[in-house]
Image (cartoon, rainbow, N blue to C red):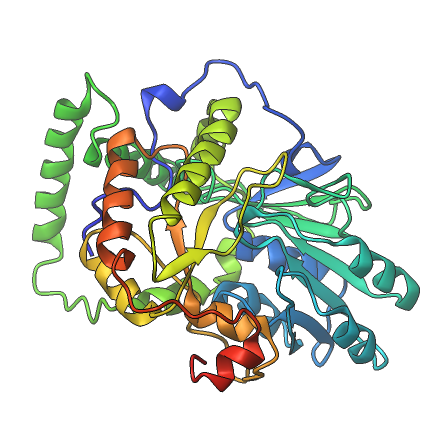
């Protein structure tokens, strides 16, 4: 798929600041923070810190991406999936029942960057001696009931690539424990250079660096030509969506032990945090307004929580297969989590099953231009504006009875 609009943040002059000026409290402000190569590497480190052993049970949400689960399996843990309720929070009745047997850890996520209630899980974990990992990969900012995202978990994990124009980066953070046990090696020089080139190449491909776009694009063409010569005759293999997802789920233990590159950390340090925060909220609000013109889809969340800067805009589609394919054909980098870990229960009372198929995740990041947002709106109206009669019921049982799931 050719991206008509960027799926993730892109470096631009507009987003750069010479000074680091945080907008408000965020995951990165927790007392202990270590930068890793990815969010899944951060989960791997958190599991090692809690002493996960082969056979230990870890409760994970039924709505998930593959890279959330891979670290548990790699360390020999036994994954048990718990259902989520209508607002995306964990089904606490299920967790209370499941934790009557030994459980080493519970992982819960702030899906889409919309903060969820984590206090009930924290209380349950305290009562039963269970470690709590707060997955903030989608939520750099946000609060729920006065608690900043990441502050309630024994360990919290984040993803830098979702909020900053960098090709790598995650973090493990904690307000409760030391991170001295997270030993990370320095990034090799070759990798540092690759990260820097990747940042600039992606920025110029979307023409976000006026004044140097042309000169740098000449260098990238030369690089591509030299790479083509060196790789002549090499079979690249399939490039379909499933292969890309499988690669995302893969976790290289060697890479997990390396720190986030200095180049990527430098980019993060000089991004305008206030502008990033406000732009994401504004783009989310604009898509909310646009959804009023759609008849075949509706927003999963009717509003933006205070102090939150969403990762994506979740759209609940009546005919998600058609909508997904049509939007991608138009160059919109939409995605969904319909490829789940084998063994995930197919429970019709679980909203995770509905979301996995029906929720389309649309970009709303800070580096979408006005032109980009106009294009996304036109695409949504074109695909969903004249859809069939929308599905009325909102509970999974009703959806199942109608044959939607």
Q: Where does residue 383 sit, x and y in percent of width and height?
A: 24, 58
Q: In the drawing, does residue 45 fall left or right of residue 9?
A: right
Q: Nearer the viewer, residue 363 or 44?
A: 363
Q: Residue furthest top?
A: 18
Look at 46% across and 44% down and name the residue there: 162
Q: Is residue 108 above or below residue 163?
A: below
Residue 332 shows in this picture: no
Look at 25% across and 27% down and name the residue there: 208
Residue 38 shows in this picture: yes
Look at 55% across and 19% down and name the residue there: 20
Which quadrant would residue 25 be assigned to in this image? top right
Which quadrant would residue 178 be assigned to in this image? top right
Q: Is residue 190 above or below residue 402?
A: above
Q: Nearer the viewer, residue 159 or 61?
A: 61
Q: Nearer the viewer, residue 145 or 233?
A: 145
Q: In the drawing, does residue 293 fall left or right of residue 240?
A: right
Q: Is residue 175 above or below residue 246?
A: above
């Amino acid at each position: 798929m050719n991206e008509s609009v960027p799926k993730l943040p892109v470096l631009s002059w507009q987003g750069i600041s010479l000074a680091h000026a945080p907008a408000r409290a965020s995951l990165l402000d927790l007392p202990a923070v270590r930068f890793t190569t990815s969010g899944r590497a951060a989960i791997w480190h958190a599991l090692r810190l809690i002493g996960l052993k082969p056979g230990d049970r870890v409760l994970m949400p039924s709505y998930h991406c593959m890279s959330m689960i891979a670290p548990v399996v790699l360390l020999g843990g036994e994954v048990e999936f718990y259902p989520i309720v209508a607002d995306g929070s964990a089904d606490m009745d299920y967790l209370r029942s499941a934790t009557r047997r030994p459980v080493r850890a519970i992982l819960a996520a702030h899906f889409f960057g919309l903060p969820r209630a984590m206090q009930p899980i924290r209380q349950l974990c305290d009562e039963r001696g269970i470690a709590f990992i707060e997955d903030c990969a989608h939520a750099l900012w946000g609060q729920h009931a006065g608690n900043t995202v990441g502050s309630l978990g024994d360990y919290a994990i984040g993803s830098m690539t979702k909020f900053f124009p960098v090709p790598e980066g995650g973090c493990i953070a904690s307000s409760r424990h030391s991170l001295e046990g997270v030993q990370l090696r320095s990034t090799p020089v070759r990798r540092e250079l690759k990260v820097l080139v990747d940042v600039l190449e992606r920025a110029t491909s979307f023409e976000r660096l006026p004044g140097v776009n042309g000169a740098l694009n000449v260098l990238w063409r030369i690089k591509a030509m030299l790479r083509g010569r060196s790789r002549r005759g090499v079979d690249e293999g399939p490039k379909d969506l499933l292969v890309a997802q499988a690669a995302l789920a893969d976790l290289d233990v060697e890479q997990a032990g390396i720190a986030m590159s200095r180049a990527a950390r430098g980019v993060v340090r000089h991004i305008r945090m206030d502008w990033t925060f406000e732009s994401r909220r504004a783009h989310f609000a604009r898509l909310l307004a646009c959804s009023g013109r759609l008849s075949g889809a509706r927003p999963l969340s009717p509003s933006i929580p205070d102090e939150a800067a969403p990762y994506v805009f979740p759209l609940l589609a009546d005919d998600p297969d058609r909508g997904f394919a049509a939007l991608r054909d138009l160059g919109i980098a939409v995605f969904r989590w319909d490829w789940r870990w084998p063994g995930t229960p197919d429970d019709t009372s679980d909203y995770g099953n509905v979301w996995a198929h029906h929720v389309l995740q649309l970009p709303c990041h800070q580096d979408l231009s006005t032109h980009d947002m106009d294009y996304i709106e036109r695409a949504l109206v074109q695909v969903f504006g004249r859809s069939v009669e929308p599905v009325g019921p909102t509970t999974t049982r009703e959806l199942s009875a109608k044959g939607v799931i």
